[in-house]
Amino acid sequence: MRLAAAELVDSREILPGQWLQAYHAPELADGSRAGQFVHVRTGDFSGLVLRRPFSLNTADLATGIVTIHFRVIGRGTEWFTRLRPGDAIDLLGPLGRPFEVDPRGRHVLLIAGGLGMAGVRMLADEAIRDGRQVTLLFGASSAREVYPSNLLPDEVEYVVATDDGSLGHHGFVTDLVPDYEGWADQAFACGPTGMLRALAKQAEGRRQRLGVAKLGRKRGAGRTAALGSPAARRKAYLQVSMEQNMGCAVGACLGCVVMSVTGTPQRVCREGPVFASEELAWEGAWT
Amino acid sequence: MGGRLDVRAKRRVVTPNGRPAGAKRTPTVRRVRPAIVQATPRPRIEAVPRSEAATGSPPRARADIDLSVDLGRGLVLRNPILVASGTFGYGVEYGDVVDVDRLGAICCKGTTLKPRIGNPTPRVTETPGGMLNSIGLQNPGVDAVVEKYAATWTGWKVPVIVNVAGESVGDYVAVTRRLEGVPGIAGIELNISCPNVGRDGLQFAIDPDAAAEVTAAVRRVTDLPLLVKLSPNVADIRPIARAIADAGADALTAINTLSGIAVAPDRHRPLLGNIYGGLSGPAVKPVALRVVYEAAQTVRIPVVAIGGITELADVLDFLAVGAVAVQVGTAIFADPTLPIRLVDELAAECRRRGVTSHRDLVGTALPKRAAPPSAKGVEYRP
């Protein structure tokens, strides 16, 4: 974690109300991993007192450029859209813990709902770099909200579902997931809590259904990893990137918690934002 | 030079047997301290903690400016910029981003006797000029806090003040007993804005008798420097401040958050999981100034101000209405290095004004005679 100066390189409205911005921040691009996020300060000091957390959408080590993808939902995000190339802001990051891909996994399934694309986009880059096959299932409300495929790596198989049926599958993105359940070694999701809850439910009992107790006979098989550890996430079939109202984003204020199955609140900014789906309590007053 | 100050600040904390020699659990006879701490005649240690080469930081307090603050009972801070409870965790969270040893003191997250899981989410939201939070005092309990962090704190030069919360006088006393004599703990700040279960769940902080009772009970079991945090959610702060001071507090901190709510975007319910939240940030600064102004005229113990500090001008405002030190809270979230910058800026401001200590700037806006209290109304005067 560091406080890094960043200079805006490019800013585009890629979808109605959704922006993709590229910042030159070599300190951040180096060492950031998919699933981590940055906490960005707005320059609008007339009443905005908090930073805004954004998933790292891509991080390119060679050019030192990181991108963020966000929807304009208020004065803070609107302020960012008025930045011009050359303007400087400061980013606190990289924060949180990244997605953990099982080194033995060949087939990676990414599931994104709407702006959840920002959370899993970078994992597509990483998985392809490591020689894995990537299928990305994307859900949006209509065709005009669908993430442009030219912003994705060529190697990704991109499958779209829209709520109104204007493009791809007519229905929720979660309808598509069972088709890939057997193919995928691991799944990684980001999106609305309702979608993540449905996915967590689908993932339950997958091992029994598929008749695979484990991925072959490998070291560490049968041993249970400590809850919340990177090893536990690496072993999990489904990893989710959670969202929550955030204050400090470093674990000091305890504002952004989600409930775990052990009954201990977990900080999205510190223990998360990526959790193994079986670590979280999906039912109850907290979700 | 720096070594001597450290010894003084922590001298009574590192006693081997848990309790300073001769400390009995009897009501302590309190020496009355002036609200405005005067420079003591003995040579003072200046806030030049480390060689600049070591950290490569910008210019900092020079030897000619004395920023130290005496909060009573040997708790002498190197500078008057503290970080407020709940905004800085246990001091370890900001890691390399903030050099904690340059802070005046750290007030850690509210600590209770038993672990607490806190309130349902959402817990925080931004509001115009501030934020609402209702964390619900999530913490691992005093035993875990001592076990996990006290050793780290012992290695720091910065004093750590543990913020203590509870739902009965017994809770506060039990937590305090656990903290007493633990190396690395320099003081206690009582969060009395908690429901007193014994008294129908009304906050300790809104009733002079309850506030005095809990302060006195804690005072009886500890010789640690004792700060008590005032709640602004009262009609008249003066009797409460007076009761707390008379009950043996070494200093007051003011203010805790203001009670408020936010509405969910669908307008079908309040936004926060706990319905009510505490408002902090620049929005509360005028209220904090008023409470500090009234408290500083009422009591003779030092007052530490909190409430919407985001720049040096805010610090100077609070000093002017009688605070001897300030805590930075919400602003840390946006600007983690702000408290340390304020230390440098305050020293530079003292130099610019030609004073040798920020203590010369304390209380300049206080009236010669007691001002009429705000409880009498702010506009209409008979």
Image (spheres, helix red, strand yellow):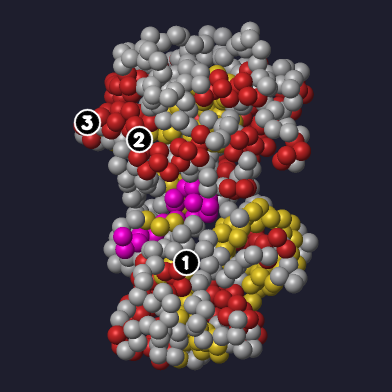
Q: In x, y percent, where is residue B252?
A: 45, 23
Alpha-carbon neighbours of circle 2 within 10 Å: few (<14), some, or many (≥20)?
many
Provide the residue designation for mark 2.
Answer: B165
Q: Are marks 3 and 2 in contact (CB under 8 Å)?
A: no
Q: Could you tell me the amino acid type at mark 2?
A: Ala
User: Residue A140: where, in percent of width, then height?
Assistant: 49, 81
Q: Quadrant of the N terminus of chain B?
A: top right
**Residue at mark 3: chain:** B
Amino acid type, residue under disc 1 in the picture: Pro
Tell whether B251 sits left or right of B7.
Answer: left
The reply, left or right, for residue B320 in relation to residue B240 is right
Disc 3 residue type (three-letter): Arg
How far apart, in angstroms, are the residues tagged by discs 3 and 2?
16 Å
Question: Which quarter of the figure has residue B208?
Answer: top left
Is the residue A202 above or below the residue A61 in the image? below
Name the subunit of mark 1: A
Q: Residue beneath label 3, please? A: B199
Q: Is residue B270 above or below residue B115?
A: below
Q: Residues within 10 Å of mark 3 (few under 14, many from 20)?
A: few
- Magenta segment's dominant SS is loop
